[in-house]
Image: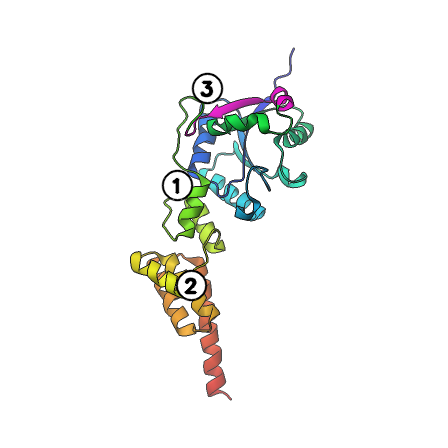
């Protein structure tokens, strides 16, 4: 009798950051019983990506964990296996490593139709095709696998998310999960460096975005202009009382004020 192996689909990528399109594909696979689990394999360094554009691996892994925790399905898992392998991350090496660790598992690779043309360029591509099955989900172009033909096609990509964040534009929960959005904000990931004048111009264009005041306030703080910094942190908290980083910076600024008052009145 042939051994029945557990089917695990691997959605592999930089997840820089993870977005709702990634999660929709993973859930579609589970809903259609195309796999019993889906692992989001976070790559420390994709050979096709510019390493300078990547957030730290630990941050990208944590964002995936936060996104999956928000869904609450134990069949969806974050996988950090590629952190133990030489860089850059070649899929064939990852599959060899995982098959060695989990010999009772049948691995399936989830890949977007827009990268189908790249498959011949992958390391040991023909050998990889013999090692695992591919499920191709629909993207902007290319042909999806028949099993994935009706999977939702999201007009979302990580590059657009990063560009929106860098420009100071709001990114909705329909694009990235709220815990991921909060993590990006608190860690100041993908933020474009701006001057105080530039942030002031951004605020004039969008005066109700808390993070704009927070970023300008940080620059005031760095310039030792603590009064203006406090005003910006207070305004950020008025707009978003849950802005943890703004609260922390306001407390630090208040501590400086308290110290100065103590120094003046208690020589």
Residue matched to label 1: 175
| Mark 2 closeness class: few <14, some 14–19, many ≥20 residues within 10 Å | few
Image mark for residue 22: none
Residue matched to label 3: 147
Q: Is residue 250 visible?
A: no
Q: Position of residue 155 (x, y in %)?
A: 38, 35
Q: Position of residue 93 (x, y in %)?
A: 66, 31
Instruction: Look at discs 3 and 2 and give the one toward the viewer.
Output: 2
Q: Residue at x 39, y 33 (%)?
A: 154
* 231 with respect to 257 (left or right): left
| In the rendered image, the vertical position of residue 121 relative to residue 254, given as above or below | above
Q: Earlier in the sequence, mark 3 or mark 2?
A: 3
* 242 with respect to 131 (left or right): left
Q: Judge whether residue 135 is colored magenta.
A: yes
Q: Judge whether residue 35 is colored magenta.
A: no
Which element carries disc 2, helix, strand or loop? loop
Q: Residue at x 47, y 31 (%)?
A: 26
Looking at the rendering, the stretch of residues picked out in magenta corresponds to: 126-140
| In the rendered image, the vertical position of residue 248 relative to residue 92, given as above or below | below
Residue matched to label 2: 195
Instruction: Look at discs 2 and 1 and give the one toward the viewer.
Output: 2
């Amino acid at each position: 009798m042939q051994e029945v192996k557990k089917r695990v689909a691997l959605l592999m990528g930089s997840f820089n950051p993870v977005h709702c399109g990634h999660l929709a594909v993973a859930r579609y696979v589970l809903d259609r019983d195309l796999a019993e689990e889906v692992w989001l394999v976070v790559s420390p360094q994709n050979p096709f990506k510019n390493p300078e554009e990547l957030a730290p691996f630990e941050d990208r892994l944590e964002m995936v964990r936060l996104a999956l925790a928000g869904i609450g399905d134990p069949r969806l898992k974050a996988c950090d296996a590629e952190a133990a392998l030489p860089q850059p991350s070649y899929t064939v090496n990852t599959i060899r490593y995982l098959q060695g660790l989990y010999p009772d598992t049948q691995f399936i690779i989830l890949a977007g139709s827009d990268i189908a043309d790249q498959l011949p360029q992958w390391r040991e591509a023909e050998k990889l095709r013999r090692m695992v099955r591919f499920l191709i989900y629909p993207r902007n172009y290319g042909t999806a696998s028949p099993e994935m033909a009706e999977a939702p096609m999201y007009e979302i990509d990580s590059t657009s998310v990063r560009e929106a964040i860098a420009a100071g534009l709001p990114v909705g929960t329909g694009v990235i999960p709220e815990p991921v959005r909060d993590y990006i904000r608190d860690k100041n990931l993908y933020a474009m460096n701006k001057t105080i004048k530039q942030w002031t111009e951004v605020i004039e264009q969008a005066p109700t975005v808390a993070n704009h005041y927070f970023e300008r306030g940080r620059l005031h703080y760095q310039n030792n202009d603590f009064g203006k910094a406090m005003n910006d942190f207070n305004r950020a908290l008025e707009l978003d009382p849950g802005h943890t980083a703004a609260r922390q910076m306001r407390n630090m600024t208040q501590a400086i004020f308290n110290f100065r008052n103590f120094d003046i009145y208690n020589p």
